[in-house]
Image (cartoon, grey):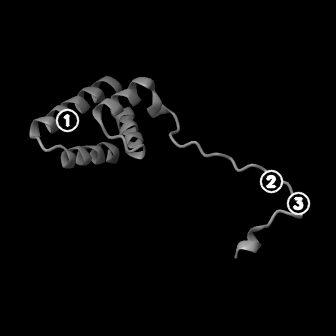
Amino acid sequence: GDGVLNVTKIIIDSKPNESQCSKFHYGLKNLCKRFGSKRLEQACRRAIALNCVQFKSIKSILEKGLDQTPHIQLAQAPNIPEHDNIRGMEYYH
């Protein structure tokens, strides 16, 4: 998928040595066999989102099952009570 492809491009661009790229490639293939292609794709997407594109990070994401959980937790805005001293959106326009 796109996640694995982007991770591969990042690694190829960052590794000066062809043997390092080969080791990374074989490592990803082994992770794919062990965890499956869908989970590897999700782990790669999460690694990119966290700006942590390293084999060790991707492996850790898979081992801990973080690829199966939402990676962005959106905080809910607190309910602000109506009050005369609170300026609304109109004030800042």
Query: The disc labelled 2 sits on which kind of residue?
Result: Ile
Query: The disc labelled 3 sits on which kind of residue?
Result: His
Question: In x, y percent, where is residue 24?
Answer: 21, 34
- Is 89 situated above or below 38? below
Query: The disc labelled 1 sits on which kind of residue?
Result: His
Local SS, label 1:
helix
Q: Nearer the viewer, mark 2 or mark 1?
A: 2
Residue on which the image places disc 1 = 25
Disc number placed over residue 38 in the picture, else none = none
Looking at the rendered image, the quarter that the N terminus falls into is: top left
Residue on which the image places disc 2 = 80
Question: In x, y percent, where is residue 10?
Answer: 26, 47
Task: Judge left or right: residue 67 versus residue 37.
Answer: right
Question: In x, y percent, where is residue 6?
Answer: 29, 48
Q: Nearer the viewer, mark 3 or mark 1?
A: 3
Count of labels in the image: 3
